[in-house]
Image (spheres, coloured by chain):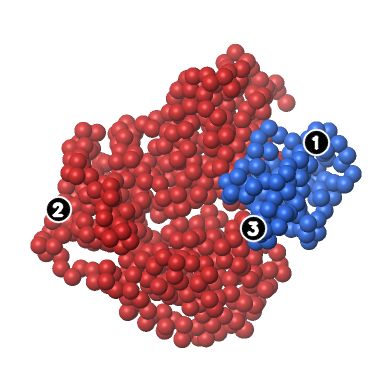
Amino acid sequence: MGTKLKLSGADMLMHALHDEGVELIFGYPGGAALHIYDAIFRQDKIEHILVRHEQGATHAADGYARSTGKPGVVLVTSGPGATNAITGIATAFMDSIPMVVISGQVASHLIGTDAFQETDMIGISRPVVKHSYCVFDANEIPKIVKEAFHVATSGRPGPVVIDIPKDMTAPDNLFEYEYPKKANIRSYNPPVEPDENQIERAVTELLNAKRPVIYAGGGAIASNAEEELFRLNEILDAPVTNTLMGLGIYPATHHRFLGMLGMHGTYQANMAMHNADLIIAIGARFDDRITNNPSKFSPGAKVIHFDVDHSSVSKIIEANIAVFGQVKNSLSAIIKLLETKLDQYNKDTLQPWHDQIKNWKSSHGLNYELYKDESDENPILPQAVVQHVYNITEGKAYVTSDVGQHQMFAAQYYHFDEPRKWINSGSMGTMGFGLPAAMGVKFAFPNEEVLCITGEGSIQMCIQELSTCLQYNLPIKIININNEALGMVKQWQDMNYGGRHSQSTYQNSLPDFVKLAESYGHVGIKVEKNSELKSALEKAFSMKDRLVFVDVYVDPAEHVYPMLIANHSLEDMWLSKDKKT
Amino acid sequence: MIKRKLTLIMENKPGALVRVVGLFHQRGYNIESLHVDPVDDFTPYKFIEEQLETKFKENEISRLTIQTLVSDSLMRQILRQLNKLIDVIAVSNEETTYLKGVLLDENLL
């Protein structure tokens, strides 16, 4: 053994990140982080991306993490740098996205003195992190980094904060650097392999179900279980629905795919869930946007729940069989056992169930009432925008979205055949997520088509990142579905508040998005007529090396349907403005 | 709603207690009483050391007892949420014990 490297805290941090395999950091400098920023300057292994707002840094790291499966890394300064990052940390937390956020802190001796740019980052982030560390001894930086990445990426993933007081990274204090090979946290032991008894019980139910539905969510994507899920359903031949977070884990173009379920799920997906005799929940957690009223949820169904998180099972809907472990491993175990019992299973017993679903699908399919008329006398329908984008990109693009009507239209009409290509803030519903998230995806996949479907409300919440896109030459395509109002708020006001549009319109104060894009050095295209839509989108996607902002004015009166009727069951839906089930 | 007693064995680290208390606060459960002590006699916790393949050292772990008013269904959820906290080693109510993800059918703490 030669002598160990002697490094400052800041240099140890950079070495540790490199040893952990980090290639990119999204961040923004400031006083308490300056020692770390100097260490960044003096190395060339990790690239730092300078965003324009710390929220943008967290969402970019989040988009990077969702698309690659690797943890996103963020570096911010103390005080406002740290608090600005909170929304993005909470977004990652709610969707179980692995992320490590390093925040500068005022020097140790100043903590608690109301020092300049001091805020209790550990305290303020506590409810929205999986875990957090404050560095009290610079010697511990490598160990803490190792642990932070282990916690962020294992079990149910989530964000981890490392708060580093400025004196811990001082250039004059040197320490022997060694990066631990393994994180050893004795009090942390997330389940990996499933219990065999539960697997056997689950298989018995699977073999006997007459009306099964596979309900897969973001946890299945986090566990990279797409092959196992596909193989499982080669055996079962059951209908499959995905949550908003799970889209892509099962191919949307597969004939057994029902579409998304829940609040704005398809008619057939919600009807199938309500009438099922067995729900196979895979990395999904029966969110309130899925169950509607839990006491009326799927009255005749048994539930098999596959999850890595004990606290997610039987929280809202009681599971008859709970299989804890990495979903990928649990499904492998199920497949292995099922394959020994194939003689006991006959796909044909599901035929009446498939016929029933086919009936539901044909009576109220998604394209119901769409495309009645594409002439220029009629306004552009937002759904049509997504359908054109889907066709032009051949369903192969990475699509990020913001939050609101456009997000639901994107989820309904862009059909994802692969996981990790649909990047949206599902649980937190964070407006402003889409553009910075698209940046993170584009950094990870520079040669892939990356587009952001957004609205004129959401895009203005992180619009400053257009400048970052110019600095790093990120040719993202932004599709702004512009209905000149906060569409989802307005829809609820139409449906539940007698059409009183309280604070959901802008009184003609919207910017000229074309000029705005141009002022940031990008290309802007405005579309107002149906006849211009397709060619404008084709033109945008043909400009491979430019960021193009397509501002599409759509029908401001359009609502998202189907929509669950609050406090009822999954079979109670609005199908259009004047038609319920 | 009945008064329930929870016992936790956790790492004696800054911030560990506030994570436990915060979990109650966030969900609107009131804490009726709270008691924390460092553990100096590890004999009752040999089974934890064996399960975690570790040796506790002086001042490394704390024993925490909490009394709170909750329903049975919430009780289970609280246990699971406490078990999920990284610094919590084991948590039990009158009937069950969570020892880092392993559910045991008796109060061992």
Residue at the image point whose x is 54% and y is 78% from the top: A300
Identify the chain of the residue marked 2, using the numbered disc in the image: A
Q: Identify the residue position indicated by label 1 in the image.
A: B38
State the CA–CA distance, disc 1 to disc 2: 69 Å
- Name the outermost residue toward the top: A172
Q: Which secondary structure, mark 1? A: strand
Question: Chain B shown in which color?
Answer: blue
Q: Is residue A252 placed above or below A145 in the rendered structure?
A: below
Near-viewer residue (A42 or A133): A133
Across and down, in percent, residue B33 comes to 73, 44
Residue at the image point whose x is 69% and y is 41% from the top: B87
Across and down, in percent, residue A363 comes to 32, 79
The mark closer to the camera, 2 or 3, is 3
User: At label 3, which amino acid type do we have?
Assistant: Leu
**A197 to the left or right of A572:** right
User: At label 1, which amino acid type do we have?
Assistant: Pro
Chain that is red in the image: A
On the rendered image, what quadrant is the C terminus of chain A found in?
bottom left
Identify the chain of the residue marked 1, using the numbered disc in the image: B
**A359 to the left or right of A544:** right
User: At label 2, which amino acid type do we have?
Assistant: Glu
Q: Identify the residue position indicated by label 3 in the image.
A: B74
Near-viewer residue (B30 or A375): B30
Residue at the image point whose x is 17% and y is 44% from the top: A508
> Is residue B83 something one can see in this rendering?
no
Across and down, in percent, residue B31 comes to 67, 46
**A244 to the left or right of A459:** right
Q: Identify the residue position indicated by label 2 in the image.
A: A528
On the rendered image, what quadrant is the N terminus of chain A found in?
top right
